[in-house]
Image (cartoon, helix red, strand yellow):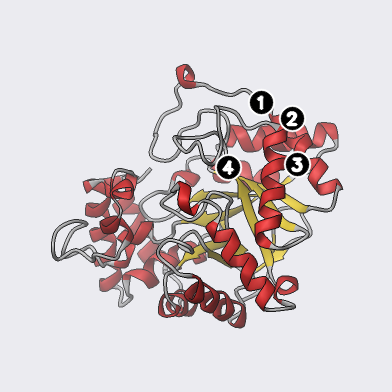
């Protein structure tokens, strides 16, 4: 896999990134360390985490994922220097007061969160430090529309950028990024950075998969013209695009009991638990079979081959899943198949948006 440059930063990363939000919840520490080792061994040297992980978010597991990764670094001298390490500062609470109290995300919050992540990760520097979700009210996490009446922003974007600039100047962060952002947000962060000599965002980490192609509703143009890279998360739609729910549905005695949507009620209440999302997934999974690919190969090939995507974030709970995801690299969807995908999208739109 050829390395790609993240935005206009000096970071060069693999086109596949290991997402780690299951570490500390579905994945215990020994298994997580085995996955990290195999990932690095196979050339996936880009690791993404966040201060609020593991997921589903609970007070008891907040910070657990970073701690597991930090322990792996401590047990494997030299490993830290071989990976590009990304983590995220949580936005306003969203019902998780143990992550962030109050409705803001101040400069002091950003600095304190970075210090906490550095300690848990047992490292002196974070390669890519991202704002996990905006302080502003945005149409994200299943909210389709922007509603001015729900605006809660307290901290100017410039103030947040200046806090991130201080971390970069101190050598604690190499590059910065955003997550769950909109075209407006990306444009504002870039313009303010250029106007005031502040760090320029290198990347945006947003959901992108066959069930949620909202990136292509204008955000892709913004990022292309401004030179910002997309990190695509949830390429398998929280498991809907693996085919494992096709026959059983997401609940009931025949549903896969250890799978995320079946196991966690909080996940079922989100966009991934919508009947429309499962119905659409079944159609895409059937199209995969018709092309001679597994649903996993099909869904990942879609992300791996799209011009919008710089690196695809894969989340796994076993070595077998990791190998399957990496082995899919190089699979392509023909123009005819992509046309069929677009027909399905026209019919079903983005049911998990």
* Residue to which mark 3 is pinned: 164
Q: Is residue 229 above or below residue 311?
A: above
Outermost left residue: 253
Lateral position of residue 318 relative to residue 346, left or right:
right
* Residue to which mark 4 is pinned: 90
* Residue to which mark 2 is pinned: 159
Q: Secondary structure at mark 3?
A: helix
Q: CA distance from mark 1 to mark 2?
A: 7 Å
Quadrant in the picture for the N terminus: bottom right
- Precedes in sequence: disc 2 or disc 4: 4
Lateral position of residue 310 relative to residue 195, left or right:
left
Q: Is residue 192 above or below residue 215?
A: above
Q: Are marks 1 and 2 in contact (CB under 8 Å)?
A: yes
How many numbered marks does the figure carry?
Answer: 4
Q: Which dot, 2 or 4, sits closer to the camera? A: 4
Q: Is residue 346 visible?
A: no
Q: Secondary structure at mark 1?
A: loop
How many C-alpha atoms fall within 10 Å of the one at disc 3: few (<14), some, or many (≥20)? many
* Residue to which mark 1 is pinned: 155
Q: CA distance from mark 3 to mark 4?
A: 14 Å
Q: CA distance from mark 2 to mark 4?
A: 16 Å
Q: Is residue 254 above or below residue 104?
A: below
């Amino acid at each position: 896999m050829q390395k790609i440059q993240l935005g206009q930063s000096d970071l060069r990363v693999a086109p596949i990134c290991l997402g780690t939000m299951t570490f500390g919840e579905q994945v215990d520490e020994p298994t997580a360390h085995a996955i990290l080792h195999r990932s690095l061994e196979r050339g996936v040297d880009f690791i993404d985490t966040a201060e609020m992980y593991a997921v589903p978010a609970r007070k008891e597991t907040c910070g657990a994922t970073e701690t597991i990764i930090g322990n792996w670094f401590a047990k494997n001298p030299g490993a830290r220097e071989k990976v590009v390490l990304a983590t995220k500062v949580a936005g306003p609470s969203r019902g998780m007061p143990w992550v962030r109290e109050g409705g803001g995300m101040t400069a002091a919050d950003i600095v304190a969160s970075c210090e906490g992540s550095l300690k848990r990760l047992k490292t002196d520097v974070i390669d890519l430090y991202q704002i996990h979700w905006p302080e502003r009210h945005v149409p994200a996490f299943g909210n389709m529309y922007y509603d001015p009446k729900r605006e809660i922003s307290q901290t100017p974007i410039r103030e947040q950028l200046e806090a991130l600039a201080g971390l970069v100047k101190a050598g604690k962060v190499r590059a910065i990024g955003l997550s769950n952002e909109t075209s407006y947000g990306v444009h504002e962060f870039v313009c303010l950075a250029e106007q005031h000599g502040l760090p320029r965002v290198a990347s945006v980490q947003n959901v992108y998969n066959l069930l949620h192609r909202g990136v292509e509703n204008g955000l892709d143009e913004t990022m292309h013209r401004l030179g910002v890279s997309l990190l695509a998360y949830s390429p398998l739609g929280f498991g809907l695009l693996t085919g494992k729910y096709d026959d059983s549905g997401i609940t009931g005695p025949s549903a896969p009991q250890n799978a995320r949507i079946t196991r966690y009620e909080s996940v079922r209440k989100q966009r991934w638990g919508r009947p429309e999302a499962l119905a659409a997934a079944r159609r895409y999974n059937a199209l995969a079979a018709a092309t001679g690919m597994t649903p996993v190969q099909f869904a990942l090939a879609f992300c791996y081959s799209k011009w919008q995507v710089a690196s695809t974030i894969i989340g796994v709970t076993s070595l077998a899943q990791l190998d399957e995801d990496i082995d899919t690299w190089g699979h392509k969807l023909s123009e005819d198949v992509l046309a069929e995908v677009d027909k399905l999208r026209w019919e079903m739109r983005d049911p998990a948006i």
